[in-house]
Every structure is written in structure tokens, then in C-alpha cells.
Amino acid sequence: MAKYLAQIIVLGGQAIGRAFAKALKQEIAASQEAARRGGGGPQGEKRAEANARSGMTLEEAKQILNVDDLKDLEKVIKNYEHLFAVNEKAKGGSFYIQSKVFRAKERIDQEIKQQMEDMRSKQRETR
């Protein structure tokens, strides 16, 4: 009986060890992919910080608001207002989706603000 119990414990430990190792490898790969997408350096750090603060990547925010280019502010605002209004709880919409739309707009606003600050700092450097 003790022999079987020991075998069960050993096999269970091996299975847990393999699962842990696999999860660790996936986390490292995801981390490297996020760093690659962020661009590395100070710009990548800023983008990673903004992603962590809003809980959403810029790519995800652009997908939610169906926007390809952040320079088209009118389209960003138009899509945001439409999606936010359509998903109002009073109109039978989803509060969850409405909050995702709000967070997407918030994340895009952060990115636009960062781009404006970067442009201002470059202008100061050239003077």
C-alpha cells in the first residue's frame, strides 16, 4: 500500500513539475513578445507602462474602436461615441462592452498624449 502511495505522489509531482515548466516557458515567451512589440528602450518602457495602467494594449484598443490610424481623431471620437451609446444599459446594451469601449478610448488618449509630448520635446531639442 505504501509503495503505491509513493508512486502516486511521485507521478503527481512529475506532472505538476512538467505543467509548471510549461507555464514558465509560455510566460517567458509572452514576456519576450511583449518586449518586442513595445519596441524596447525608453519608448517601449513608456508603452508597457501605459498598457499596464490601462490594462489594454494599444493594438487591442484600436481593434475595439475599429481604428487603424491614430491621426484620424475624428474617426476615433465618432466610433467611440457610437459604440458607447449603443451599449448603454438603458438601451439593452452591455455594461461590460461599454466599459471596454471606454478603456479603449482612454488607452488611445494616453498614446496620443504621449506622442504630443514626444513631439514637443523633439521641437525643444531642435531649437
Image (cartoon, rainbow, N blue to C red):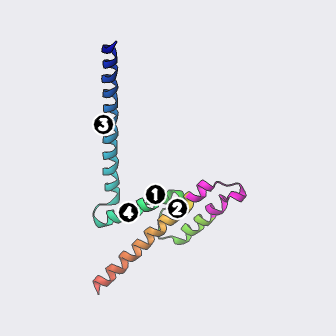
| Contact (Cβ within 8 Å) of mark 3 with mark 1 | no
Picture layout, residue 75 above or below residue 19: below
Q: Where are the magenta residues, as a range?
A: 82-99
Q: Amino acid at mark 3?
A: Ala
The residue that label 2 is drawn on is 103
Which mark sits nearer the N-terminus, 2 or 4?
4
Q: Position of residue 24 (x, y in %)?
A: 31, 41
10 Å neighbourhood of mark 3: few (<14), some, or many (≥20)? few
**Label 3 vs label 2, nearer the camera:** 3
The residue that label 1 is drawn on is 55
Q: Is residue 95 magenta?
A: yes
Q: Give the prevailing secondary structure in the magenta stretch.
A: helix
The residue that label 4 is drawn on is 49
| Contact (Cβ within 8 Å) of mark 1 with mark 2 | yes
The residue at the point 37 percent across, 77 percent down is: 119
The residue that label 3 is drawn on is 21
Count the marks. 4
Quadrant for the N terminus in the image = top left
The residue at the point 34 percent across, 28 percent down is: 15
Which mark sits nearer the N-terminus, 3 or 1?
3
Q: Position of residue 92 (x, y in %)?
A: 71, 54
**What whole-number distance in Å separates the C-alpha atoms at marks 3 and 2?**
34 Å
| Contact (Cβ within 8 Å) of mark 3 with mark 2 | no
